Image (spheres, rainbow, N blue to C red):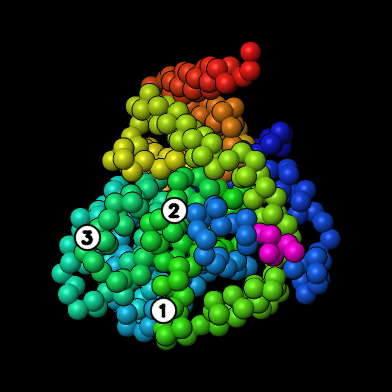
Amino acid sequence: MAVPSGRHLLQIPGPTNVPERILRAMARPTIDHRGPEFRELTLEVLENLKPVFNTSGPIVIFPGSGTGAWEAALVNTLSPGDKVVMFETGHFATLWRGMAEKLGLDPHFVPGDWRHGVDPDVLENLLHDDRHHALKGVAIVHNETSTGLTSRMAAVRRALDRAVHPALLLVDTISSLACMDYRHDEWGVDVTLGGSQKGLMLPPGLSFNAISEKALAASRQTRLAKSYWDWKPMLEANKVGFFPYTPATNLLYGLRESLHMLREEGLANIFERHQRHAEATRRAVKAWGLEILCLDPAEYSSSLTAVLMPPESNADQLRQVILEQFNMSLGNGLGKLQGKVFRIGHLGDFNDLMLAGTLSGIEMGLTLAGVAHSRGGVAAAFDYLTQAAATRQRQTSEVAPA
Ligand SMILES: Cc1ncc(COP(=O)(O)O)c(C=O)c1O
């Protein structure tokens, strides 16, 4: 393989490309995590995170990966043997179910085909039939990173309301936070889980729990064993700007910068940008004559697109050709999708020309790997991106002073 030149394109659906601004913000000396400068940093990031989750309640930050956020959400809100409804939307939902079992919970895993999100009617019926409220939690992966589908959270909330059921709602937004509209308070979510390495544009290493009052009250009674992930000492220390153990100081510098960047661009613009790149990608995939894994357009993900390979071709071979020839990483098929699917990440710090490069690399790779496809995917995406840019240009000139 030739020595790669230029920038590597990290088009897996997270970790995402880390912008220079964040890299530079992190490249500073580590400070005393019990001193006054650190206190200000903690208080600033905890406050500025709230609009990202759309909450006025507390958020805790753990040094840890998304898996830690899963564990924290479960161990703080539930007790041994508690029943939890979970939905088989893909690999990550399956892993979370496995964790629930290991922790001594009793998950009710609603089977799925990995091509559809959570069915709110199924949830409503389950809750409705649970007259004695044996179900203590509903745990949902908002954006299934393994399959590229997004469950409809507003409809999930309505299902819970219609069933008048007190189960706690736990939602994994690890690959949707700061990419798609998300409303912790309005949707009555009890714990929202996040991770640093996707829409927040940071390296991996931070995970989040946004906590409702109901979840906090529950956490005072629940009996699953917890220590590192216990919210209580974390919330107490956070009140005065500190952590109960050594925090990931330099990642917090990065988080502060990320939150500034999100505020400068504006969340509504960020969501629109993610939708635009997702739509352009889907147009390319359709023009290639390949199939999008997600079957319901209402559940298409704005963060990533999972593409099914023709049955005679292997996705990992295509990914290898693209990595070797064009210095770009694409996401692999996870679990039972291994070799059958490749995933295009279009989330985080990303723009039209980065997407154009990504799709160009895939189109060239499809030819080199001998995958049956039609040409014209890149052109279809270009047309869409050009139209979208023309609309933006018109709108800017309409609002500009004469
Ligand atoms: C939706 C979702 N949940 C959970 C995880 C697990 O997070 P981590 O690998 O950071 O532990 C991931 C990882 O990509 C994810 O995409």
Say above or below: 61 vs 151.
below
Q: Read off the residue under disc 3.
A: 162
Judge whether residue 43 is colored magenta: yes
Amino acid residing under circle 2: Arg
Q: Read off the residue under disc 1.
A: 218
Q: Nearer the viewer, residue 208 or 68?
A: 208
**Around disc 3, counting alpha carbons within 10 Å, would you say few (fewer than 14), some (14 to 19), or many (20 or more)?**
few
Q: Nearer the viewer, residue 274 or 109?
A: 274
Q: Pinpoint residue 123: horizontal percent, then vertical percent.
A: 23, 61
**Around disc 1, counting alpha carbons within 10 Å, would you say few (fewer than 14), some (14 to 19), or many (20 or more)?**
some
Q: Read off the residue under disc 2.
A: 183
Specify the principal SS of the magenta part.
Answer: helix
Q: Residue at x 56, y 28 (%)?
A: 352
Q: Residue at x 35, y 31 (%)?
A: 290
User: Nearer the N terminus, badge 2 or badge 1?
Assistant: 2
Q: How many marks?
A: 3
**In the rendered view, does 15 fall on the left or right side of 130?**
right
